[in-house]
Amino acid sequence: MALTQRLELKQGQTLVMTPQLQQAIKLLQLSNLELADYVETELEKNPLLDREHAEAEAPAPEAPAEPADAAPLDKTLSEENFGTAADLDAGRDDLYTDESRAERNTPSSSDPPLADWSRTGSGGGDLDDDFEGSLTAETTLKGHIESQLTIAGLPPHQRFIAEVLIESLDEAGYLRADLAEVAERLGASIEDCESTLAVLQGFDPAGVFARDLVECLSLQLKERDRLDPAMQTLLKRLDLVARRDLAGLSALCGLDLADITDMIAEIRTLNPKPGLAFGAEPVQPVVPDVYVRESTDGTWHVELNSDTLPRVLVNARYYAEVNRGARSREDKTYLTDCLNSANWLVKSLEQRARTIVKVASEIVRQQDSFLTSGVRHLRPLNLRLIADAIGMHESTVSRVTSNKYMATPRGVFELKYFFTSAIQSANGGEAHSAEAVRDRIKELVENEADDVLSDDRIVTILSNDGIDIARRTVAKYRDALRIPSSVERRRLRQSETSAVK
C-alpha cells in the first residue's frame, strides 16, 4: 500500500482556559491575606488599576466596556468543568470526600499493591512534587498533631472539638483553653471535651496538650510507665524539688534519700516544653471572611466581611488620556491588554465575593442544627451537596471553602470543618452519619450475649437496618472504637468464665 499525502477537515471540542479565567479561578482559592498580596502585585504591574477610597471626591467615569461577545464571569464559572484544571486545584486536603484520610489510606486485600490513595490524580508528577516539598517544608507542632488526628478514629463531633483544641495550643505545646468554656461555646458536653483531650494527650510528643507543668511531666512519665503513686506525690511538690528539700520529699513519699535522688534525676530528663522541638509556625491572624448572625425572626444572616476585601477600580480617565497620545501599535496593544486585565480583575473580585457568600449561606442552611444546638448536631455534608444546591461545580466549592473562615456565635471555624462524613442508606433513604454507625456498632458489641458477633454478622445486622457498609469498614470503625476482634472477645470471655468457675 503506497503512502500518500492528503488534507482532512476534522471538527472537535477542546477546553481552552484563558489567562483571565485562570486568574478568576485562582482568586477563589486565595485566603484574604494572599488576596491582598496578589492585588498589591497587580496594582504595581497595571497602571490602569487604582485603589478605591470610600472618601473619593467625585465618581470616576465608567471604564470602557469589554467586547460584547465576552461571556459573563459568573456564568463561565458555574458552567466550567474545573476538574480538568489540575494545576489550579485547591489541594488534596480540601476535597472533603466522604471518608477521612485515614479511611482512604487503608487499602483492602482486593486493592492493587501500588494503588494511589491520594484525593487528586495519581500522576507521578504530583507525587514527586509532594516528595520534594516534604524535603524543604519545616514540620510545625500543629501540623504534626493534625497528621496524627487523621488516624485517631475520632467520631465527627469529637474531631470537631479536637480541631478547636489544636488551635488553642501554644508554641511550647501547652493547652491555653478552658474546657468548660470550649464545651459551652460548641454546645458539647464537658465529658466529650475531656475524652477528646485525653486522646490528644496521647499524641506525640509526650506531654503535649498539658494544662500545667505538673500535667506535662505526668504525661511523659505515664508514657514511660513510671507514674507510680510516689512519683505523683513528688510532682505535686515541685516547690520542694526546687529547694532541694530531700528530707521533706522523703517524708512525703515514704522513700529513702537515694530513691528520691533517683526520682529527681529522672524528672530532670523530661522536657518541660515539648512543643519547642518543632519549627515555629508563622503567626497569621485568623480574620473571618463571613459573619453569621442570628436575626430577630430566628433565621441566620450571612454577611461578608468587607474589611478583608481589597477595593480596586479601573482608572478610565487615565486610560483615555494616555490612549489619545498613543501612536504605535505596540502602545495601543499594551493599553488594551492592561484595560482588559484590570476590568477582569475587578469583575473577578466581585464574583469571588458573591460566590463566597453563596457557598457560606448554603453551608449555614445545611448546618442550621449545629448553630442552634451544638456540635453533636452536625449533619453529613459533602461538596456535591453544596455544589448541586447553588448550581456550581464541585471544584469551585472546594476552592471557595479553602482557607476561608466563618465567624459564628459558637466561634470562628474554617469552612471545610463543616464537611462531615456520611454513609449512604442501603434502601436509598436518608444518609447516616459515620458517628451514628460507630455508635450502632458499639451498641451491638456491648449487648451481645453468649453469641459473639463477627464483623460479617454486624454487616448483616446493619444491612437489615438500611445501612450499606463493607466488612472492612466495620473492622476499621471497630478498631477506632478500640473494640477487640470477635476472636479476641471470645477468648477473653472464655478466660473470664474459667476464672469465675
Image: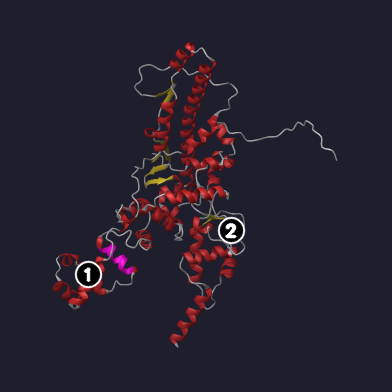
Looking at the image, residue 416 sits to the left or right of residue 141; the answer is right
Q: Residue furthest bottom?
A: 501
Q: Which residues are magenta?
A: 214-222
Amino acid type, label 2: Leu
Instruction: Tell whether position 194 is magenta.
Output: no
Where residue 292 appears, x then y in whole percent? 40, 41
Left or right of 362? Residue 273 is left
The residue that label 2 is drawn on is: 114
Question: In the image shown, does 334 or 488 lie closer to the viewer?
Answer: 334
Residue in the foreground of this view, choosing between 288 and 50: 50
Is there CB contact under 8 Å for labels 1 and 2? no
For label 1, count other residues whose C-alpha is less than 10 Å away and answer few (under 14), some (14-19) or many (20+): some
- Determine the image quadrant of residue 68: top right
Identify the amino acid type marked 1: Ile
Other residues around mark 2 within 10 Å, as few (<14) / some (14–19) / many (≥20): few
Tell me the tag on residue 236: none
C-alpha span from label 1 to label 2: 50 Å
Which residue in the protein does label 1 denote?
264
- Residue 449 locus on image (x, y percent): 51, 76
> Which percent across, then down, holds residue 84?
59, 41
